[in-house]
Image (cartoon, coloured by chain):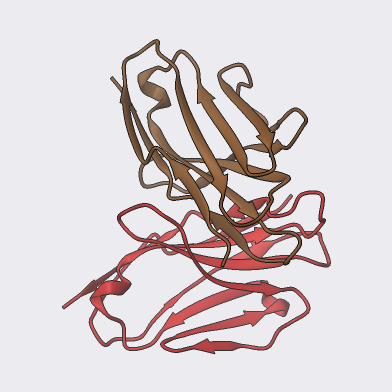
Chain colours: A brown, B red
């Protein structure tokens, strides 16, 4: 079945540095991918919609200059957390759906980011 | 606006007990999809079921069953004869159906299920 792979699964970085998270659809093409954020013991909140070949669409309250999204190919979307701060520490998870096969949404394994 | 409410924050049961997780949703769409996902401690989201708004037939899959009631906007999930491995956070979610948005999901707050041996 369709699989979405996310990398890295865990990352620790220093304040002020940038971190890139990759989301790949392994056996289908995804013109649209979604990035969610989950704070500890809370629900998942949609951050942005990543569109292949065009700008991402950000949800209200999400800083687009802080969370850079690039969807350069039909199988890869990246989320870069720029100038990370401790409050950016969270669980980030991407999802994609195989529209050709009308599947459910598949989620990546998630990335646990800790900014120290 | 779309909204999903999971009123039960945490449920604890003893193994072999049946447990029902509640989900109530709000949407103005006439066509929509409802989902249940399981999130074990490792963090990944495991898909359990997708149901479209026109299919109110209840579904059973092994120890899992789902009761979709459009009249009360509820999509409840029951685990029969619970096991310790069922311990996880369970999320109910709702999505728009336009192809443009694909799978943009609105999640409930989640219910933590603890199954004790």
- Vertical comparison of B49 with A98: above or below: below
Identify the residue shown where x is 53% and y is 89%.
Answer: B60
- Vertical comparison of A82 with A59: above or below: above
Q: Is residue B49 left or right of residue B38?
A: right
Looking at the rendered image, the quarter that the C terminus of chain A falls into is top left
Picture coordinates of residue B28, whole percent (x, y): 80, 59
Q: Residue furthest top?
A: A16
- Vertical comparison of B8 with A67: above or below: below
Identify the residue shown where x is 56% and y is 58%.
Answer: A106
Pick the residue in front: B90 or A114: A114
Picture coordinates of residue B100, whole percent (x, y): 82, 49
- Vertical comparison of A37 with A55: above or below: below
Q: In this view, does A116 lie to the left or right of B62?
A: left
Identify the residue shown where x is 77% and y is 32%.
Answer: A53
Q: Is residue A59 visible?
A: no
Picture coordinates of residue A49, whole percent (x, y): 68, 39
Identify the residue shown where x is 54% and y is 76%.
Answer: B76
Pick the residue in front: A44 or B14: A44
Place residue A73 in its image quadrant: top right
Picture coordinates of residue A1, whole percent (x, y): 56, 67
Q: How many labels does the image show?
A: 0
Q: Can residue B51 be seen in this view?
A: yes
Place residue B50 in its image quadrant: bottom right
Q: Which residue lies furthest to the left in this view?
A: B117
Pick the residue in front: A26 or B117: A26
């Amino acid at each position: 079945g369709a699989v979405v792979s996310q990398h890295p699964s865990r990352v620790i970085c220093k304040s002020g540095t940038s971190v890139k998270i990759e989301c790949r659809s392994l056996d289908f093409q995804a013109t649209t991918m979604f990035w969610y954020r989950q704070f500890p013991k809370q629900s998942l909140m949609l951050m942005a919609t990543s569109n292949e070949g065009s700008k991402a669409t950000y949800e209200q309250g999400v800083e687009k200059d802080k969370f850079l999204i690039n969807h350069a190919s039909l199988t890869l979307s990246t989320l870069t957390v720029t100038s990370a701060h401790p409050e950016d520490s969270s669980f980030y998870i991407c999802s994609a759906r195989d529209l050709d096969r009308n599947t459910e949404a598949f989620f990546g394994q998630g990335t646990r980011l800790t900014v120290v | 606006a779309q909204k999903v409410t999971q009123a039960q924050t945490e449920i604890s049961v003893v193994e072999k007990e049946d447990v029902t997780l509640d989900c109530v949703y709000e949407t103005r769409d006439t066509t929509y999809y409802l989902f249940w996902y399981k999130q074990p401690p490792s963090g990944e989201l495991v898909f359990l079921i997708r149901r479209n708004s026109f299919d109110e037939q209840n579904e059973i899959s092994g120890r899992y069953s789902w009761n979709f009631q459009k009249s009360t906007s509820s999509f409840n999930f029951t685990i029969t004869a619970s096991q310790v491995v069922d311990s996880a956070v369970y999320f109910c979610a709702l999505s728009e159906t336009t192809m443009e948005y694909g799978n943009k999901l609105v999640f409930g707050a989640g219910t933590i299920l603890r199954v004790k041996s």
